Structures are given as structure tokens and as C-alpha cells.
Image (cartoon, rainbow, N blue to C red):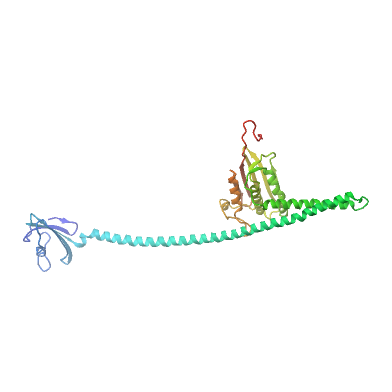
Amino acid sequence: SSTIIATGFAFIVNKTGQLQTRNMYNLQTINGTSVLDFLNKIDLQKEDVHAVQNLQYRGKEFIFFIVSLKEGQWRLIFQQEQGDAFSELYKARQMGIIILLCGSIGVILIYYLMSRKMIRFIELSEQQREKMNEQLIESGKLASIGELAAGIAHEINNPVAIMVEEAGWIQDLIKAEDFKDSENVQEFSRSLLQIKLQGMRCKDITFKLLSFARKTDPRAVKTQINDLIEEIVKLSKQRAKYSHIEIKTEFEQDLPELMASPSELQQVFLNLFNNAIDAIGTANDEGMVSIVTKRTGDTVLISFSDNGQGIPKSNIARIFDPFFTTKPIGKGTGIGLLICHGIIKKLGGGITVSSGVGIGTKFGLTIPLVLEKDTETPLFKEL
């Protein structure tokens, strides 16, 4: 016989139940009956294998494995405590229960955390949706105001044109009639000239306003950048004057024409110009907006600089995001720079921004020149 694990051992008996090995394990029950008396009742055939489980022996539960040897003459019996025999199974069961409990707790915890994260995400999405709706409403209002302003400009343009024509007609009458002896003839002429000049100025302003209000024409034509910017400066200089802002322009002369949509470029330049004025506001008595154009190789560089309040570094990366604005509520829609970025990108160029809080902001535009290839004479001379 030999000991197996902690509580197991094996022994051999003959078919009558007599031990064929040493009784080193004192195989007696409490009442003096041999354990072989229990096992001998099992009818084993040749080469049979039998197992007896939950057999009470010495106050403990045992499991017995009986194997028939030598054509049933002998029996090999293995005895072990049931707890020891199934210890690994019990450990596996306990481990399975622990894993199941931990897994359940983990699933519940993950579900709780994910649900909170999802709820937070939904709340943020709802807030962004509400913000976008508000900005869309503001954009609609601005569009309506723009259409209204265009209509008003058109209505004003007609009577102004009549006023200018009438002033010219009166001037012609004064020249034709004999008013030379009138002591006020010079005053009449001066006043009529002033009426005509101011009327032409109003007509020019309303014409520019109408040109901005018209539907954008995306067709690319030969466009002079300096002329477009000059028109915008003339249109907005009165607003800059009221805000005590000086406008400084530095245009490179003989700048080549670009193949671009004038109305789209007007929209870009006007947006950047207005942003510069808004950034300065009325708090700075020495506000300045600087506009520079120059050519570098086959590229036109345009910059809009201001000495306004500047943009925080954390906002620069989001400056071209849809509906993002640094202006107060009701002052900006958050789509102006996005549109500018799209227009410049469509032209094959780029737009950059550099800013410092309390220093100012500079927007730089790069637009490539599309030169017409000619084997004999280039379209543009080298500068």
C-alpha cells in the first residue's frame, strides 16, 4: 500500500475481503466492523471498476475506488476523504463563484460609469445643440437685417440719384440764366456743388452696400486685391473713425491680378476687417488696424493686424471651428472665420492666426497666383 495526497491510501484484498497488504491504517469502524465488510458487499465482475461515495467512516465521509485484479481474485481499493478528493474541484468552484461575483460587480460598475459618461455626453450634446440653434437664429436675424439693409440702400439710392440730377440741373440753369449780378451766386454754386458731391458720395456708399448684399458669385475672374481692400476700407472707415481707430494700409504696387471670385474675397476681407475693429472696441484710444499686401514668388500675402485685446492661447486652436466665437452673445455667429477658411482653402491658399492677450492679433492669408503659361512671353513680369 502507499499514501496518496493527504488523506488517501490504497490497499489490496482478496475476494473474501482479507487484506493482502499490511493494515497500516487500522481499517476498523467505530463499532468494530471492518471497512472491508462494507466493501465486500459490492459484487464486482472481472476487470470491473466501481466507486463508492459518501461512505461514513470514522465520522468522516470517504470515497472509495475499487478495481478488480487478476480476474476478480484480488481487489485494489483506494480510499480518500471526500473533501480531499474533490479539493481542486471545490477550489475551482469557489474560484468560479468569486470570478462570477467580481465579474458581476465589474459589469455593474462599468455600466454605472458608462451610463454616467453617456448621460454627460448627451447633456453636452444637448447644450451644444441648443447653442447651435441660438447661433442659427442669430445668423437668420443677421441675414434678414442684411436683406433689409440692402432694400433700404436700394430705396435710398433712387431719391439720392434724383437729388444729384436736380442739383446738376440747377447748376446748368444758373450758368444759362443771368445770375452774374446776384450777390449770392457764388454761395448758390458752392452749395449746389456740395449737394452734388455729398449725393454722389451717398450713391457710392449705397452702391457698395448693394454689391456686398448681392448673392455671392463663385465664378473666378481676374481680381485686383488692392482695389477690393480699398473699397472695404472706404466703406468701413467711418465706423473706424467713431471707434477712434486708425487704418493703416501698405499695398505693394503693381500687384498681379488673382483668378478668384471678387464677391467671395470681399466677404473674407470684410470679415477680417470687422473682426479687427471689434477686437479693439472703443476702450483703446490708440487703436490701429494694419493691412499689408505683398507678393512672394508665386504667392500673394495679405495680413490684417490689430492691437486689440488678443485671443487666449486656449482658443486659437478652435478659432476656425463651426459656431465658435470669442465675441459676447449676440455679437458674433461663429461662422465668419469658418467661411473665410473655406474660401481661402478653395483658392489653394491658407490662413494663419497669431495672437497674444493684450498685444493684438494678426491674420495672414496666402493665395497662390495662377499664371497663364506662355512659351514666348510670360503674363506677368518678374518684380
Using residue 309 as the reference point, say whether residue 130 is left or right of it.
left
- Residue 340: x and y in percent read 61, 49
Give the number of callouts: 0
The quarter holding residue 23 reads: bottom left
**Which residue is farthest top?**
376
Residue 60: image quadrant is: bottom left
State the residue at coordinates (27%, 59%): 92
User: Residue 26: x percent and y percent?
Assistant: 11, 62
**Lateral position of residue 179 relative to residue 215, left or right:** right
Q: Is residue 176 visible?
A: yes
Q: Is residue 237 visible?
A: no
Residue toward you, 272 or 160: 160
Is 255 situated left or right of 182 in this image? Answer: left
Question: Where's residue 359, x and y in %?
Answer: 64, 50
Task: Give the residue at the far bottom of this rendering.
Answer: 31
Q: Position of residue 378 (x, y in %)?
A: 64, 33
**Lateral position of residue 184 relative to residue 105, left or right:** right
Which of 268/97 is in front?
A: 268
Instruction: Give the answer, above or below, for where 240 lies relative to 258.
Output: below
| Quadrant that contains the N terminus | bottom left
The residue sitting at 58% across, 45% down in the picture is 346
- Which corner quadrant holds the C terminus? top right
